[in-house]
Image (cartoon, helix red, strand yellow):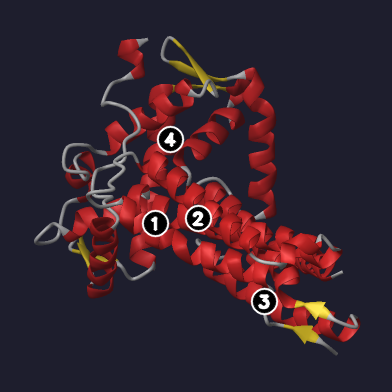
Amino acid sequence: MSLLVGLISFAVLAAAVPIVVRLRRQRNAIPTIIALAVAVHVITTIAGAVWLAEMDYWQSAAPYWFATIILLYAYGTCYRSLSVLMLVAISRSAVQAIAVQSLYDVHFKPFILGRIDALLEGGRAELREGRLVLTSAGRSDAARILGTRRIFGLSKNRLYFEKKSPMETG
Amino acid sequence: MALVIIPSQIVTASLVGSASIPVFLLALSRQPLLVGDLRKRLRLCSMLAIALWLGLMLSGEELWRFDAKALSDVAAGGLIIMSTILTVLIVLLLVAAGVSTTLLVSLSAKPGPVEIEPWLADYGSGFGIEDLFRDRLNLLLGTRAAALRGSTLLLARHARVPVAVLEAAMVYFNKPMGR
C-alpha cells in the first residue's frame, strides 16, 4: 500500500505540473517543478500516514522520486536538447523536410542565442555596450563547473563526432 | 497515524549503494583506476554500486524471509539506486556537455567583454556554433532519425512516433520550441 501512495503522489504531481508551468511562465521551470515535487511529497506523505494503519516512508518515496526524476529529465530534454529541437523543427516544417542552411539560420542559431538570453535573464552575464561579459554570479558558477569538471575529469569538449560536415562526407 | 521512517536493511543497503556512486565515480575519474570514456565510466560505476547493494542485501537476513515487506523493500531499494544513477547521469551530462555550461565556462576564460558573433564562432576553443550544428546534424543522421537528400534534411519515417511523443511532451510542459 505504501508503494501505491507513492504512485498516487506522482499522479498528483503529474496533474499539477502543466498547471503550474502555465501559471509561472518561466524559461526554465526546473526549480519550480522541484519545489512543487517537494510540496506534493510532504502533503501526500502526511495524507498517506493518516490514511494507512502503517505507512513505510521509503516504499512510498522511492517510486515517487524515481518517476519525478524521469519527469525532470523529460522536461530537460524538451527544454535543452538541441538534437530534439532540431528534430521537432524538421517535423513541423512542410512535408517534414527542411534545407540544412534554413535549419541552422531559422532554428539552431536562435536556440543558441536563447541560451545566451537565459544567461542574461539569470544574472549570469550582462551586456556592456553591446558586448557580453560575465557577472560575478556567472563567474562563481563557471568556477564551480570548472572545479567539478576537474574533479571528475570532464575537461574535454563534448562534440560527439569529428569536425566534419555531413554534406561533404555524404 | 503511523509513519515508519527507519529504513529496513534492504533499503539501507540501497542508500549505501547510492552514496557509493559519487565515490566510485571519483575513483574511476583518476589514476590508477581511470576510465577515460565517460559512458564506460558511468556504466561501470553504476554496476559497482548495484553490486554493492546486492552484496549488502544478500548478506542480510531480511531478504531471505521472502515476505511481502521484503519484496516491496527490494523494489523500493532498486528504485532508490536507479534514481541516484539517473540523477548523477543528468548532473554529469549537464556539467560535461551542457551548451549553457560550456558557454558560461568559455565566457569566464575571456578577460573582458566579447562581441557575441565572433565569440560564438569559436566559443569552445577549437570549435564554434557551426561545428556544434554539424555535430548534432551528424548525431541525427547517425541515429537515422533524419536523412540527408542533397542539402535537405528529411525526417525519417520511423522517427515520426518519437517526435510526436516529444511534441506532446512539449505541450504538456508548455514549452514552445526553443523557448
Q: How far apart are marks 4 and 1 (CA)?
A: 43 Å
Label drawn at residue B141: none
Q: Position of residue A40 (x, y in %)?
A: 71, 75
Residue B139 visible in the picture: yes
Q: Distance between the residues labelled 3 and 4?
A: 53 Å
Which picture quadrant has residue B53? bottom right
User: What is the chain identity of the residue bearing mark 1?
Assistant: B
According to the picture, the residue beneath numbered tag 4 turns out to be A106
According to the picture, the residue beneath numbered tag 2 turns out to be B49
Q: Which mark is in front, 2 or 4?
A: 2
Q: Position of residue B157 (x, y in %)?
A: 65, 18
Which picture quadrant has residue B20? bottom left
Q: Earlier in the sequence, mark 1 or mark 2?
A: 1
According to the picture, the residue beneath numbered tag 1 turns out to be B24
Q: Position of residue B89 (x, y in %)?
A: 47, 52
Q: Distance between the residues labelled 2 and 3?
A: 18 Å
Q: From this viewpoint, which residue is outermost toward the left?
A: B111
Q: What element carries label 2?
A: helix
According to the picture, the residue beneath numbered tag 3 turns out to be B7
- Residue contact between numbered discs 2 and 3, judged by CB atoms under 8 Å: no
Q: What residue type is labelled 4?
A: Val
